[in-house]
Image (cartoon, grey):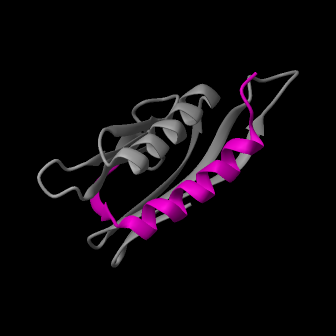
Amino acid sequence: MIIRDQDNQIELDLVEVDGPPAGDGDGHFHVKVSAHGFSGENYVWVEAFIFHTFVDELQKLANTRSGSAQLESMNPHELRLMVRVLEKTSEIAVEGELRRNVVLQSRRQRVENRLVFALTLDENGISETLRYLRQIKAQFPLP
């Protein structure tokens, strides 16, 4: 999935599904964000139920032009994505945060890389995003 607003974008690609018998059907995603000259990426796990709920809420938001939809990784400090309708303008705002902890071996120091982002989706953008998300949703049904 690519959410794009001019030169800013969010990419969310399903890498694998942790399916039965070992897993619960959760999704492993590669996330890349480029916003206002800054960029970052990470691999995050998202619970199947959370992802399904996000897609359903996003569909409702697109239909009613109200409300919000939120997606959070299993480790909530890695990915937070919020899509909401701005009341005054009816624009669709996309906001969030992507984080990744790294260890600098030479200094034995832990560093948190963090990117906070915000962009706007138009009518075509929400339709394309939903089409892609429904395809992903079909790849890992709820247990």
- Tell me, yes or no, whether the highlighted magenta stretch contains residue 132: yes
Judge from the rendering whether residue 28 lies leftward or rightward of residue 84; answer left or right.
right
Return the x and y of residue 137 as percentages of the image width and height: 67, 43
Can you say whether 26 is above or below 12 in the image?
above
Can you say whether 74 is above or below 98 in the image?
above
Q: Residue at x 65, y 42 (%)?
A: 28
Q: Residue at x 69, y 52 (%)?
A: 135
Q: Nearer the viewer, residue 130 or 8?
A: 130
Residue occupying the far right of the picture: 21
Return the x and y of residue 15 as percentages of the image width and height: 71, 50
Q: Nearer the viewer, residue 115 or 93?
A: 93
What is the quadrant of residue 49 in the picture? top right
What is the quadrant of residue 126 in the picture? bottom left
Quadrant for the N terminus, please.
Answer: bottom right
Q: Nearer the viewer, residue 130 or 136?
A: 130
Q: Is residue 39 visible?
A: yes
Judge from the rendering whether residue 88 lies leftward or rightward of residue 125; answer left or right.
left
Which range is magenta?
114-143
Return the x and y of residue 100 as percentages of the image width and height: 44, 45
Can you say whether 19 is above or below 11 in the image?
above
Q: Is residue 11 visible?
A: no
Q: Residue at x 15, y 58 (%)?
A: 89
